[in-house]
Image (cartoon, helix red, strand yellow):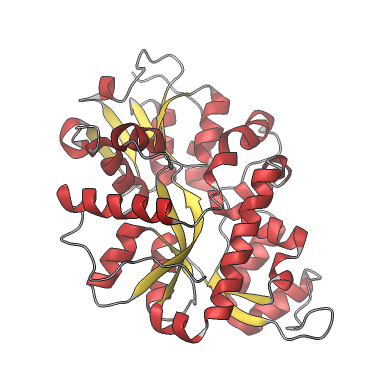
Amino acid sequence: MPTPRGDIFSRESVLGPAVTRRQALRAGAALFGAAGAAALLAACGEPTAAVDANGNPLRPIKIGAVHPGTAGSVIDPITEQFGLDVKHGLALNRDGGGGVGTGQENLLTGLLDTFAFGPLGATDATLAGHDVVIVGPQLWNHGRWLVPADSDIDSVEQLRGKRVGVQPASSDTYKAAALALAVNGIDFEGEYQLFPGQPLAGLALYERGDLDAIIAIEPNATRLVAQGSRQIATVSELWQKGTGDSNPLFLNGAAFNRPWLEQNRETAAGFVALRTEANALIAGDPALLSRHYEAFGIPGHEEAAIALLPERLREIYPTTWDTGVFANMDRQIEVAIDIGLLPRAADRPVYESLS
């Protein structure tokens, strides 16, 4: 019989993660569209005027709804705390519900003006006839290889042949894990018993003792570590080891449909500046992460996990957008082609600088 390792994700797989009142209102606003957003946010006491304090008009931009339990969810309260939207001349309209896959589809169809894409996803979309371009940083990869506290495993090599939980094969987490192992001469799909699935389902299996290890993303990984799981590697560390790249593995950035971008470069630049400043604020004061623990979907009674957030997540919010990051993305695409995740590269880079 497997030994149970916890029950927080087993409960959430049934009940769903905890959400704050503000997050519930925002999710409802996304479902009801612009009119519903105005009504719901007004009920929360938030202004709906599209001008700044001096009466200057704010440029509207449609972005994805905020979802608790993801590394990027903390950007929303930080944006509000520091007034970054108005500072950068933007009116943020959260018009798209759903998770990452839905958000990316909404960008491709024009329902959103921007959404997070990584280099592999942007390449896939471009090869399928879209024209997606990434123009600013959002997150470094935050996949973590975890094993139970009582496991004698100390490395990913020792997990060969073992049962490893991971997100679906279409996810960035799955693809990044494959890339990071490939550059170290390890065949992800060939050398492990993989159990791909939706995050909460995999986490529940891990807690139940049905998996030998799991590749979890933040903040879920930190919640597991706070329960006693051991982190034996990160996907970024494996990538750096295998490539010699000093940068962590780039996860995703602010992406746009190129035709929209060409007509709205000032708005896009304002959004990139907002996200970059939010990341810089985290770098300057990592305690922001623990102060906004609710945005991560972490209940207040998980004090150990909340205390670990500044230490474990401070490094995953990039502020650089330069040739080193571009080389990182090019190398990902190259490895993805080598191992069959992509058929070929796009005819032009799937990234650019707005400056």
Q: Position of residue 252 (x, y in %)?
A: 43, 56
319 left or right of 125 in image: right
Q: Nearer the viewer, residue 47 or 288?
A: 288
Q: Position of residue 175 (x, y in %)?
A: 29, 48
Whether residue 64 sits left or right of residue 191 in the image: it is right
**Residue 179 x, y percent position in the rendering:** 27, 43
Q: Is residue 333 above or below residue 48?
A: above
The answer to whether 227 is drawn above or below residue 43 in the figure is above
Quarter of image, res 77:
bottom right
Q: Is residue 296 visible?
A: yes
Q: Is residue 205 visible?
A: no
Residue 104 rendering spot, x and y as whole percentages: 40, 68
Number of dots carrying numbers: 0
Residue closest to the eye, 146 or 199? 146
Quadrant the N terminus occupies:
top left
Q: Quadrant of residue 343?
A: bottom left
- Judged left or right of residue 299, residue 335 is left
- Quadrant of residue 157 within the rendered picture: top left
Query: In the rendered image of this protein, does residue 153 appear above or below residue 171?
Result: above
Task: Residue at 78%, 79% (x, y): give it.
Answer: 52
Vertical position of residue 164 compared to residue 338: above or below: above
Residue at left offset 36%, top offset 46%? 173
The residue drawn where x is 71% and y is 43% is 285
Q: Determine the residue positioned at 46% across, 80% down.
A: 261
Q: Nearer the viewer, residue 130 or 8?
A: 130
Instruction: Point out the residue furthest to the right here.
Output: 54
